[in-house]
Amino acid sequence: MEIKAIGCEPLQLRQVLAKDGHTLKVYRDMGGYSSLKKALGMAPADIIEMVKTSALRGRGGAGFPTGMKWSFVPKDSPKPKYVVCNADESEPGTFKDRYLLERDPHALIEGMVIAGHALGAATGYIYYRGEYNYLIDIMDAALAEARDAGLLGRNILGTGFDMDIFTHTGAGAYICGEETALLSSLEGFRGHPRMKPPFPALEGLYACPTVVNNVETLTAVPEIIEMGAEAWRDLGTEKSGGTKLWSVSGHVKKPGVYELPMGYADMEKFIMEDCGGMLRDDKKLKAVIPGGSSVYIMNTSQILGKKVTLDYEGLVAAGSSVGSGGFIVMDERVDVVESTRNLTEFYKHESCGWCTPCREGTDWLVKIFDRIAAGGGRPEDAQVMLDLCDNMEGRSHCPLADAAAWPIQSAIQRFPEDFKKWLWKNTGSAEGKELTVNA
Amino acid sequence: MAAVKPSDYTNQVAVTDEVAEFSPEVMDEIRSYLEKYPPDRSRSALIPLLFVIQRERGYVDNPGVNFLAKFLNLEVTDVWETATFYTMFNMHRVGRHHIQICKTLSCKIMGEPDITDHVCSKLGIKPGETTADGKFTVSLVECLGSCGTAPMMQIGFDYHEDLTVDKVDKILGEFE
């Protein structure tokens, strides 16, 4: 597997690529914790302003501007405040945070303490997905090193600022990557999302003001402080600042974690050259899911020759979105009905069951896919599935129902031939027939 | 080896009031989790402690749950409510080595079906079953965040990646 920066110097990947980058000594030798020192000398409002200027957007999937999220935390609240790192990386196709957590834990600690100073938080939690158990030991060792060196705990670097950070484990629930479900889980409850508003910035962990950020979002913060907000932003584009990690899997020669400047051109070159091209030379590209499973699937006419730029605006214009940056590349051997069925099973399994449209909708969708796969496809199935998706999208407390609907909607629209093959299996030729009523 | 279904292992004896007991070392470990959370928020330690129960008792059993309810000052149903939500908690005994094969898209298209077939035929069981000697359980699970090194499986907490049939033989051979 490749780990590599293309089109920029490795920033997020600097320690990841270094030998023993997870140790305090190497991290400090490479300039680590100098941003913390600088940040502790700054006014909290100035740090938030810097993060706003940097155009850093949340790297977990939603892409919400981080500086704005931080600015929602009330400054005058008498309640304790919390910084929570979302290390519940579970989006199919995404594995970038795993390498940051394994090989660069101090960057996360530094980013969280800077966030703590900016927000007035004295406590931070890192919520790991349960399966990432081995990474918790690595982080606990790094936290102990940081405490011993006066970088964490009481009177950090002699400035009088106190903050401590603790690791916490989930136990196998994709939904806990949704920030309010994560907080329910961190409080020891089932991982059900909460009603919003109130947003976590006002009432989050223990009903106190809380910021929840992805691992990659927080590890970018020390870079921003070190380089300056404008310099970091200008690595990317005006609205999508900095660099971003992309996880690449599936049918390419060189799967891996790639750091690219935001706005990297173009998607075709990235797959066909940077990632080594198609795994088998005799098999052509068929489909790409560029942002983890919860985004629209793309066909080749949306990619090849289209100079798609890899940033929030570029991928939306091309018909998908950045999501968590998990590229799943599929060659012509893949049947998109089968691949969409696989993802629908995932969402059915991971639906927390709280909202009826999501719980029942994903279950019915899987039932329809199962019947189709067993050879019982009917011409009206595509329309029935789209109607089900309509009744799910936007009708649940969290975006899991949307995430289940989008792959199906886009697959039917963009790969009609795959669906026709299955749905007309028992009713003669699909020639000249419409897959959907409202297509 | 003959297949044993989870239900054969369940031993669902009548609900018991028995409370599990632990060694002083384990009790120290259990108490250490409370230090992470505010004193009035000890329920936060529930999920980490359920892992301790599972490790010590083999699965999340009734006496273990009774212990946690008492220790964290919760109702027994509070503990069950949380425990049953999370797929990593087993409510029945599983094999000493729990093999979890990722079946989500990237692994699926990179050869998961061949790996699953091989593991299952080698052990003589189907996904969801435990070998008669109680050594292995095989489960198919959703994405474990190892898509770039697909196909993969997790045994216990250990990741095994870039799997091939030969590699599976070698890995399973080490458990003999």
Image: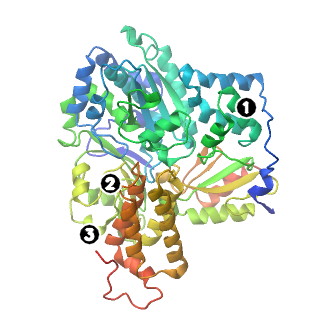
Amino acid at the residue labelled 2 = Asp
Spatial CA distance of label 2 from label 1 is 54 Å
Amino acid at the residue labelled 1 = Phe
Spatial CA distance of label 1 from label 3 is 59 Å
Residue A313, x across and y down, in percent: 22, 51
Q: Where is A323 relative to A381, above or below?
A: above
**Residue highlighted by disc 2:** A274
Q: Where is A100 relative to A33, above or below?
A: below
Disc 1 is placed on an element classified as helix
The answer to whether B115 appears left or right of A77 in the picture is right
Q: Nearer the viewer, mark 2 or mark 1?
A: 1
- The reply to whether residue B10 is in sight is yes
Amino acid at the residue labelled 3 = Ser
Cβ atoms under marks 3 and 2 closer than 8 Å: no
At 36% from the left edge and 79% from the top edge, which residue is drawn? A417
Total of numbered circles in the picture? 3
The answer to which of A66 and A269 lies nearer the viewer is A66
Do marks 1 and 3 both belong to one polypeptide chain? no
Q: Residues within 10 Å of mark 3 (few under 14, many from 20)?
A: few
At 49% from the left edge and 48% from the top edge, which residue is drawn? A174
Q: Quadrant of residue A32?
A: top left
Disc 2 is placed on an element classified as helix
Residue A43, x across and y down, in percent: 25, 16
Q: Nearer the viewer, mark 3 or mark 2?
A: 3
Label 3: chain letter = A
At 76% from the left edge and 59% from the top edge, which residue is drawn? B5
- Which label was assigned to residue A301? 3
Label 1: chain letter = B
